[in-house]
Image (cartoon, grey):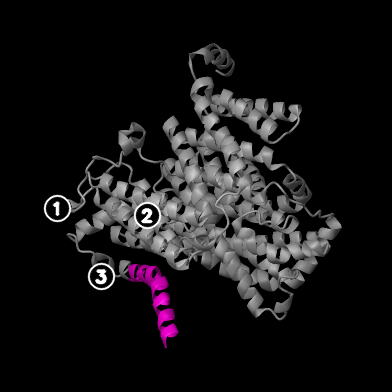
């Protein structure tokens, strides 16, 4: 009952004029960002974080969360009408969404996506509201060893479940962590890693400089190259009547995928580092597996649109759970939100629930409000979004570059960081072409300032004995799971070799 | 692509070694009573980076990953052209910030991108390249009270005039 009281306070808070206004703007921007190929929630949140310095933190996070939310809805629009996923989270939506559109049923696919997103969002919001205070309560007893073990788990999931090239993933994680160590050594107070004695490195490398460099500049250059400016849109004729009729079809044929996506998405989203992209792909796979007509998948099954769309919304809320309760982001986007919280002067972690109840519950309340508005705005303005997708990239790209440069400067007010950001941008472009995953580096630069002190404090507690991470009742199992995940690829490799020899 | 993969791994390996040396300027061992030294964390992470680059090179020899098998060029003509056009634009943009202010550099960058690269009409170009700096100015200087770089001395009279409007 106490939770319901907090929740109604939070919803009330998010309905305050300023917050409601930010939700509307955020959701609309998010829908657009999600719909534009090459731009996802992470790009939007990274590029727009610097503009939130204008409003109080509780409103800033509501705005960014609304962008995150809207982007999950928006990704489907381009997946269906262009056949190009608007964001990586909507890749699975193209599998059946595009065939439906080519059959002239684009509006059915779009309505299904919107409704499934809404259900996914609602289910995960309810789960979130129930779980978050409990988890935060448990996490209150965590000391440095437990927190470090959780960090290790976050990185281990990238290695074990990421599916990318493993040495490249590990390199990316370590590089992010080393960049986070630039500046001053907090414990001894000595300057550290001040490259070539350039004074700009004394204040460290702000995570936004890396995040905007990677997601604002590097990815844009990559997108300009890979799309080659050629896109064709499929129109969707919609009216109130067709929306009602399509909703009925969507409910009849898409309930199974929606249900699976909503639940599976949430739990995959909670896993540190997993996030909405694997959540939506897995939900698509499972729905196809349990479907009575798996042969229809890939040819325009309504369930095939519903499952990934329910899942990506559900997972995006799920990813907020570890971020808010443990201070460990569940996806690159939440990593940037976490970094934002630090900039706004808050200490992420379980104590937020007791120290900043208005911030936490306002955010949770805003999930519910954003979800409703995302559905309404999405359904009402689908034709407008399709029209905007025709906007030439030569107008969108300079806009993003300008926002990136200004945002990179606003974060630290130092030209040194703008140059550094450009360097990161070119570097990220080259690494991206060679399949180096870059999300781990961004996550690492955010988590570095938490991971290093907790490791050093833990080792100080145990006088240098690393067994402290195994002996403690909560840290132990977490560390062991993390180690298994890290060594999982190695074990698989050995097993394959043995099978090959036998 | 194959050559690019090897060169990138080598560059990253050199970076790791440099980071290890740089970290070693601080203590990298365990100090009794103080815990691990200030350089230990980045040193060992850089060491793991170095090991990763070695594994990447081994994968390259075994042709175990897609980029190490690919015979496509790392960058085709289109990619080279677009990188140069966009890269030069960005470099110019950032270099000009210190000379003619953030807003002036933004204007020139937008004219370059929208008109020269995008080949849009002059009215579109003008609307964007004048409209955006104005919006940014109102947002940052007037609303948020964040001052963006104003460039060299000669822009001063202009911005002094604008400041009398917003303050």
Provide residue A416's location: percent of width, then percent of height: 42, 32
Callout 3 touching callout 2 (CB < 8 Å)? no
Residue at x 52% of width, y 46% of height = A61
Chain under callout 3: A
Residue A216 appears in the picture as rendered:
yes
In space, the residues marked 3 and 2 are separated at their CA atoms by 26 Å
Provide residue A208's location: percent of width, then percent of height: 46, 42
Q: Residue A174 carries which label?
A: 2
Q: How many marks?
A: 3
- The span shown in magenta is A477-502
**Residue that badge 3 annotates:** A471
Provide residue A105's location: percent of width, then percent of height: 81, 63
Q: Main secondary structure of the magenta part?
A: helix
How dense is the environment of label 1, judged by Cα within 10 Å: few (below 14), some, or many (20 and up)?
few
Provide residue A380's location: percent of width, then percent of height: 77, 50
Towards the viewer: A195 or A308? A195
Chain under callout 2: A
**Residue that badge 1 annotates:** B33
């Amino acid at each position: 009952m106490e939770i319901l009281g907090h929740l109604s306070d939070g919803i009330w808070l998010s309905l305050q004029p300023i917050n409601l206004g930010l939700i509307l703007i955020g959701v609309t921007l998010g829908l657009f960002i999600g719909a534009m190929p090459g731009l996802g929630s992470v790009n939007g949140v990274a590029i727009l974080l610097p503009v939130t310095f204008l409003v109080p933190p509780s409103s800033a996070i509501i705005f960014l969360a609304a962008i995150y939310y809207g982007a999950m809805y928006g990704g489907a629009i381009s997946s269906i009408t262009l056949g190009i996923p608007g964001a990586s989270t909507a890749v699975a939506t193209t599998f059946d969404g595009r065939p439906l559109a080519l059959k002239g049923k684009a509006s059915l696919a779009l309505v299904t996506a919107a409704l499934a997103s809404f259900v996914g969002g609602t289910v995960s919001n309810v789960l979130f509201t129930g779980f978050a205070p409990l988890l935060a309560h448990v996490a209150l007893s965590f000391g440095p060893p437990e927190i470090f073990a959780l960090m290790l788990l976050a990185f281990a999931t990238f290695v074990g479940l990421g599916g990318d090239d493993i040495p490249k993933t590990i390199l990316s994680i370590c590089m992010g962590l080393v960049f986070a160590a630039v500046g001053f050594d907090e414990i001894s107070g000595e300057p550290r890693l001040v490259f070539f004695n350039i004074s700009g490195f004394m204040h460290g490398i702000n995570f936004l400089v890396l995040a905007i460099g990677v997601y604002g500049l590097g990815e844009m250059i990559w997108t300009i190259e890979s799309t080659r400016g050629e896109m064709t849109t499929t129109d969707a004729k919609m009216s109130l009547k067709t929306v009602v009729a399509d909703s009925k079809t969507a409910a009849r044929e898409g309930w199974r995928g929606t249900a699976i996506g909503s639940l599976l998405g949430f739990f995959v989203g909670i896993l540190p580092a997993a996030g909405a992209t694997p959540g939506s792909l897995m939900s698509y796979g499972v729905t196809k597996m349990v479907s009575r007509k798996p042969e229809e998948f890939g040819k325009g099954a309504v369930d095939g649109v519903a499952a990934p769309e329910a899942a990506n919304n559900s997972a995006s809320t799920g990813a907020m759970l570890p971020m808010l309760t443990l201070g460990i982001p569940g996806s690159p986007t939440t990593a940037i939100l976490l970094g934002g919280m630090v900039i706004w002067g808050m200490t992420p972690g379980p104590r937020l629930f007791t120290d900043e109840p208005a911030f936490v519950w306002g955010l949770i309340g805003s999930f519910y409000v954003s979800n409703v508005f995302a559905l309404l705005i999405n359904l009402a303005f689908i034709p407008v979004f399709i029209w905007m997708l025709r906007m030439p990239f030569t107008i969108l790209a300079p806009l993003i570059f300008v926002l990136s440069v200004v945002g990179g400067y606003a974060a630290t007010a130092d030209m040194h960081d703008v140059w550094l950001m450009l360097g990161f941008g070119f570097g990220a472009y080259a690494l991206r072409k060679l399949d180096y995953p870059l999300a781990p580096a961004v996550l690492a630069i955010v988590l570095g300032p938490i991971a290093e002190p907790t490791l050093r404090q833990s080792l100080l507690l145990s006088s240098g004995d690393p067994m402290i991470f195994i002996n403690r009742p909560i840290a132990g199992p977490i560390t062991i799971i993390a180690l298994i995940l890290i060594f999982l690829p190695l074990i698989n490799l050995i097993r394959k070799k043995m099978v090959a020899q036998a | 692509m194959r050559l690019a993969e090897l060169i990138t791994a080598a560059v990253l390996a050199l970076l790791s070694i440099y980071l290890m040396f740089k970290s070693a300027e601080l203590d990298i061992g365990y100090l009794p009573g103080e815990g691990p030294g200030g350089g230990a964390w980045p040193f060992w992470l850089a060491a793991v980076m170095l090991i990763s680059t070695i594994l990447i090179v081994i994968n390259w020899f075994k042709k175990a990953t897609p980029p190490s098998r690919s015979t496509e060029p790392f960058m085709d003509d289109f990619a080279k052209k677009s990188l140069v056009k966009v890269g030069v634009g960005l470099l110019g943009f950032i270099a000009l910030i210190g000379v003619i202010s953030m807003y002036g550099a933004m204007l020139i960058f937008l004219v370059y991108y929208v008109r020269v690269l995008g080949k849009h009409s002059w009215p579109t170009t003008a609307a964007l390249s004048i409209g955006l700096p104005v919006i940014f100015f109102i947002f940052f200087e007037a609303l948020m009270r964040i001052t963006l770089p104003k460039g060299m001395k000669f822009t001063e009279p202009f911005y002094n005039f604008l400041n009398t409007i917003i303050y």
